[in-house]
Image (cartoon, helix red, strand yellow):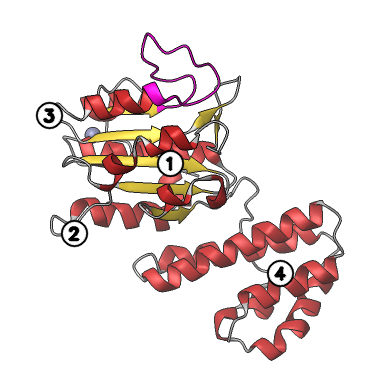
Amino acid sequence: MLLSDKYSFLINYFQNLVNNPNRAMFQSIVFYGNDLNTQYEIALYIARMLNCTNDKSFDCSCRNCDWIRNNEHPAVLTISHIDNKPLDDTSKTVISVKQAQMVKQLLLTSSEYYRVFIFCDKDNNGNVTGLNSINFQEKTANGLLKTIEEPPKNTLFFFLAQEKEDLLSTILSRSQCFYVPNFERESENYNMIKDIIEEYFLLNRRDAFTISQNLSDISDDKIKILDEIQCYILSLMKCNYNNKPFLARLMSDIKAVENAKSQIKAKVSPVNVFDNLCLAIIKN
Ligand SMILES: [Zn+2]
């Protein structure tokens, strides 16, 4: 499935933002979640929308879109411990203070482009991984705080991390944070759970334990049940991308489902996992 379909709730949200001339664009965005490569792809797509000279479509191949897709755009830079280091930078494992200075230096000159800086880490195979207090240290982040807060016009920062808590609070407080769910094992439908969980956001908390029991009883394949719950919440996200408070709630619910999956994989008792999940997502 195309990224633009799979993550349509996020993509549509940013498309609206980019296309509405009256709405102020954020200057700093934090993405967090387990699927870092997808976070990176979404950041690149937003960079493309901001620089596209054609129709801003997902498969546009104008010069700017092509450059960004191939990571060759002069104004869209990945900043990691291996990307875009100044020549005299001898640091090997971290995003260095010198890189932060380089970013600030670049912003002193004007640009015809919308400038986008994607801060992340990479593993030895070039896969995108998350920032944390070791690869993106306080002294480096501190050098950027003022710039993040009041950047020149047409500048956008991204910070990619696994957990929000991996980033300094000073970065978080200056950013809009978005959870990016992990859909690596996505279910195609939610037939098994439909009758139990449909419109769960209207259900009463006193029924949480019964619902938990009913869900858990559906199948021995607990992960499959959770995949279907995730699929259902995703379908809600897709038709509610304009309802920001509800979308935020769904995002936190989908994160609760991901946590439940990790717990099942860690052999936590399914009864406890489903009870905790239902208490987390049934709030009334
Ligand atoms: Zn384009």
> Of the residues shown, which amino acid type is indicated by label 2?
Arg
Helix, strand or loop status at disc 4:
loop
Instruction: Estimate the x, y position of residue 164 in percent, counting from the top left.
Output: 53, 51
The residue pinned by badge 3 equals: 110
Q: Please state which amino acid type lies under the numbered disc 3.
A: Ser
The residue at which mark 2 appears reads as: 23
* Span highlighted in magenta in the image: 79-98
Give the residue number, with chain letter if any, for mark 1: 159
Q: Quadrant of residue 273?
A: bottom right
Picture quadrant where residue 135 is located: top right
Residue 68 appears anywhere in the view:
no
Which residue sits at x=55%, y=65%? 252
> In the rendered view, does 101 fall on the left or right side of 170?
left
Q: Earlier in the sequence, mark 1 or mark 2?
A: 2
Q: Could you tell me how far apart the alpha carbons at marks 1 and 2 are, in whole angstroms?
A: 22 Å
The alpha-carbon separation of the residues under discs 2 and 3 comes to: 22 Å
Q: Is residue 246 left or right of residue 13?
A: right
Say which residue label 4 marks.
192
From the image, state whether disc 1 or disc 4 is nearer to you: 1
Rounded to the nearest angstrom, the CA distance separating label 1 from label 3 is 23 Å
Name the amino acid, label 4: Met
- Residues packed near mark 1 inside 10 Å, few (<14), some (14 to 19) or many (20 plus): many
Q: Position of residue 86 (x, y in %)?
A: 36, 14
Q: What residue appears at the point 55 percent right and 22 percent down from the top-left corner?
A: 126
